[in-house]
Image (tube, rainbow, N blue to C red):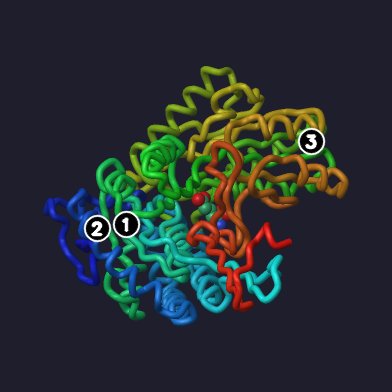
Amino acid sequence: MERLQNYIDGRWQAPASGRYDLDYDPATLNVVAEVPDSGPDDVDQAVAAARAAFESWRLVPAPRRGEMLFEAGRLLRERKEELARMMTRDMGKVLLEARGDVQEGIDMAFYMAGEGRRSFGYTTPSELADKFALAMRDPIGVAGIITPWNFPMAIPTWKVFPALVTGNTVVFKPASESPWLAYELVRIFEKVGVPAGVVNLIFGQGETTGEALVNHVGVDLISFTGSTDTGRRVATLAGQQLKRVSLELGGKNAVIVLDDADLELAVDGILWSAYGTTGQRCTACSRIIVQSGIYERLRERLIARMQNLRLGSGLDETVDVGPLVSEAALAKVERYVAIGRSEGARLDTGGDRWAAPDKTHGWFYLPTLFADVEPSMRIAREEIFGPVLSMIRVSSLDEAVTVNNGVTYGLSSSIFTRDVNQAFRAMRDLRTGIVYVNAGTTGAEIHLPFGGTRGTGNGHREAGIAALDFFTEWKSVYVDYSGRLQRAQIDT
Ligand code: UN1
């Protein structure tokens, strides 16, 4: 078992409290690591270090900053398998997906490294003669970065890499449930020569450490991924200081299946996006909205294929579905299954905990399907974040779109159809930040904007060049080389 430390101003150190929390492997309930339980004092130190480092880091040429990211990407790639195995033990996702999570970090490193030589601004004509106008990106300052446990490598890299390449410094607080990969990522930054104070790492609970970071006057912006309730609190606290905030929150993502769909392909897409990562992705499919002509056939096929899904430790390569991350996550799933039953939905399969044959006591839950779900039911509207899928019957594409758009969230949606006209209508009308045609609701690539509409966030996007917009401020520069006073809007 490893005892993790905070990283402040280039030094690994114990939390001021001297207290540690335990990090469990959710498949075996063995303790994996001891994690600092930090507080406001640690946050103060980290912010002070980041503030001091900002003045020199912002002056490091962006291509040099990009090269450090490139080196970090190279080390991530070298250690991909080892890191994936640590991730599976840390939070439970199966190895195949843990490798994908690390790969997403590698992709982001190389993509953002390239931004060191792009980060384009623009030049544009002035309305006056002998005058030059340009718009350029400026770093903002200290970025407070708060990440969730479900993508322990990918999501931190979506935030830390663009923050760094654009010249900001970072105080990074990863989720207390999956701290290990954050620790390894910061060790990599240390190794590739990111100067002291540029990246600082603070472990701790959201209510204490996270909140201290959000409230700190020395932090200029907050990038947060997590629950909608916490996001609302982050926005409220940060709003009082007019702090820039990016929120990436919940989802209630749907797959629409029209009568003319390729049935087997739709089943593949639904199983992968609903039960992959045990349903614990922001992008996971938790509703299927199915046209009546294909409804029964799809239902039967899904139930049959669900019987073949193997549960167990994610380290076993034959396993499809790992455990939930925590006791609390498991209890939430149980609560919602009880709600679904009491609302009158038909429980087709699943609906119970699962115990491994060797009697290890992981936090497992059977992949669960509710059919005959009404859009008004709570299981069709609220985020469960587990392996629970609700099947809703509709008569047309229009009705499917209405049901899809009828929830408070808007992250991802998908449609299976072979009719190009219907597909284009769906692309136009689905009110989500991400739309898939003939694929499930997961699998976003790092060079496109990632984020959602309405209750899923506050209008920002991560990844791609959209990330640069969040981590920079536009500065407009006018250079008058006429040698005389020229007045804009006056001397026309
Ligand atoms: C998340 O669930 O928070 O598109 C991120 C996907 C992954 C990222 C998911 N590339 O499912």
Q: Which mark is residue 264?
A: none
The numbered disc on residue 294 is 3
Distance, label 3 to label 1, CA atoms, is: 44 Å
Residue 378 makes an appearance in the image: yes
> Is residue 40 shown above or below 207?
below
Q: Amino acid at mark 3?
A: Ile
Query: Which of the marked residues, 2 or 3, is nearer the chain's N terminus?
Result: 2
- Residue carrying label 1: 179
Q: Where is 146 relative to 211, above or below?
A: below
**Label 2 vs label 3: CA separation?**
48 Å
Q: Nearest to the eye among marks 2 and 1: give it.
A: 1
Instruction: Give the side of residue 313 with respect to residue 480, left or right.
Output: left
Which quadrant: the C terminus? bottom right
Q: Is there CB contact under 8 Å for labels 2 and 1?
A: yes
Q: Which residue is mark 2?
A: 33
**Mark 3: secondary structure:** helix
Which residue does the image show at 45% across and 55% down from the upper left?
A: 151
> Percent x, y for residue 2?
22, 63
Disc number lying in front (2 or 3):
2
Q: Which quadrant of the view contains residue 194? A: bottom left
Q: Which kind of residue does numbered mark 2 sit on? A: Ala
Q: Nearer the viewer, residue 431 or 222?
A: 222
Percent across and percent down for residue 250 are 51, 40
Q: Residue at x 33, y 71 (%)?
A: 55
Find residue 276 and report its horizontal and vertical position in percent. 54, 50
Residue 346 falls left or right of residue 90: right
| Closer to us: 371 or 374 | 374
